[in-house]
Amino acid sequence: MTFDSTLATTGFLQTEAPSRRAGIDIAVEAETERLLAGRTRDIRLRGAIMDRYQAWSWPRRAKIVRSWMLWVAGLNVFLSAIGLIFSPRLLVFNLVFMGLFVPAVNFVVHGLWRRPRGPLIEPLSLVVATLTTMVVYGIFGSLIGGYDHERYLTGALFLAAIALVVFDMTLTWSTALGVGALLIFALFQIRNFDLEPTQVYFSIAFFGFGVAATIAARRTSTLLAHKSFLLTVRDAKYSRALAEANCNLHRLATLDPMTGIANRRSVQDHTDRLWRDPAVDKRQVAVIMVDIDHFKRLNDAFGHAAGDACICQVADAMVASTRRGLDLVSRYGGEEFMVILTRAPAETVMQIAERIRSTVEALKISVSGGETAVLTLTVSLGVAIAQDGVGPETLATRADDALYEAKRRGRNRVCRWPVDVSPQAGPTDLEQKSEVQHSAVRLTRQ
């Protein structure tokens, strides 16, 4: 994994993550729980949840339907060839209807099911195609007559019964297909004058029970498919809730709760990943230590609530001053912050540090602690740029040394390691004491 991809997964580099709840239909989840709380036989999918089921099950249903239509088309071509051998007198009907028309209907339905067509077109196409095949078989059988009449008619009904089992349709459409197939069978069976009336009625009753049982089996299969979908929806809900809980735990463990930026643990994890990644040029890695000047005096004058508000605004100003996706801003402790920069030449590092300093100084923070005031805060910054063989702990120590040198020189400034710690490099003790007393926090009374 590259360093860039690692940064993208951490969530600490001021990147915006999309909401995990986007597009989730809460009403569907509530309806799912209600349906699963009851009996399986009472499950009824309606409205939005039915639309979700249709979309969820469509790939499977489409694959079954298209395979079935190809199989039936091939069967009709085969039966047409058989018919040419045993019934040459029906050559025209056999070729036109059995060999061409019925396969053409199958291929039309096969084409319709290349993409979703809606809750009306899809089941209607299956019912029409199946009943059309039955009518053609019934006409062909009645034209042949005799035993072949019964054979072709029974075969057509058998084909419709299999379609009832195979096609995933609602009870309404399954009943329409079953009743339509039985009516076509009864109509052609009654016109079979080679059978005794008792045989006709017996066969209609016998196959009627068979169709009814097939419809009942189809209903049970549909209910189980609906329940499987509902369980999938609930599992997805629980998985999403678990992922959100894990995400929240991760955020609690790695983000500062007050400012929302990375905490000290995040800094450790981030630097460990950074130093392990051979693709990272360590010579372009830098650490900036930032400390709010005279923060204790601010707390004493205006209270800890005002101090917390100032820390939050300083954190926001630092995030706005750094590079999104490359720099990590963290709260290191109290009023102290750490910024880790990557792909940052020395000039860029100093520019970012100065931008942080000037952005914070430009803040106008309103606080109230006994009296209302507008504060102008300043920060001191210590910069250290990595070198070959320097680890993250040493780099942080050097940045901390530079930070203290910035404070020694009068605060509200940037110092880079290595620093000149000679007496001539900063103000005298008297000047430093005066600075502490008079320019700790500049404010305008209101």
Image (spheres, rainbow, N blue to C red):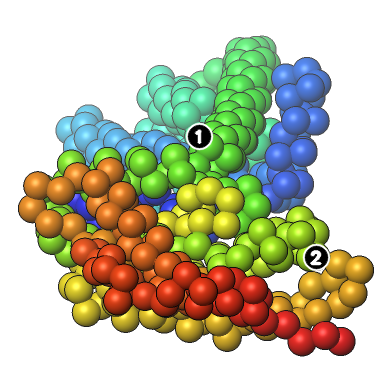
Mark 2, residues whose alpha carbon is within 10 Å: few (<14), some, or many (≥20)? some
Instruction: Identify residue type, mark 2.
Output: Phe
Instruction: Identify residue type, mark 1.
Output: Phe
Tag 2's secondary structure? helix
Find residue 164 and report its horizontal and vertical position in percent: 54, 29
Find residue 16 and report its horizontal and vertical position in percent: 49, 63
Between 328 and 128, the one lying in front of the other is 328
Q: Residue 305: which quarter of the image? A: bottom right
Q: Is residue 151 above or below residue 52?
A: above
Name the residue rendered at 71%, 65% in the picture: 298
Q: Residue 437: which quarter of the image? A: bottom right
State the mark number for residue 167. Answer: 1
Find residue 375 and report its horizontal and vertical position in percent: 71, 79
Tag 1's secondary structure? loop
Name the residue rendered at 17%, 64% in the picture: 284
Q: Is residue 137 above or below residue 344?
A: above
Between 310 and 406, the one lying in front of the other is 406
Quadrant housing the C terminus: bottom right
Q: Is residue 212 visible?
A: yes
State the mark number for residue 359. Answer: none
Q: Measure the alpha-carbon separation of dots 1 and 2.
A: 75 Å
Find residue 95 and report its horizontal and vertical position in percent: 25, 49
Quadrant housing the N terminus: top left
Q: Is residue 320 visible?
A: no
Q: Which residue is mark 2?
A: 302
State left or right for residue 362 relative to residue 37: left
State left or right for residue 84 relative to residue 248: left
Between 97 and 77, the one lying in front of the other is 77
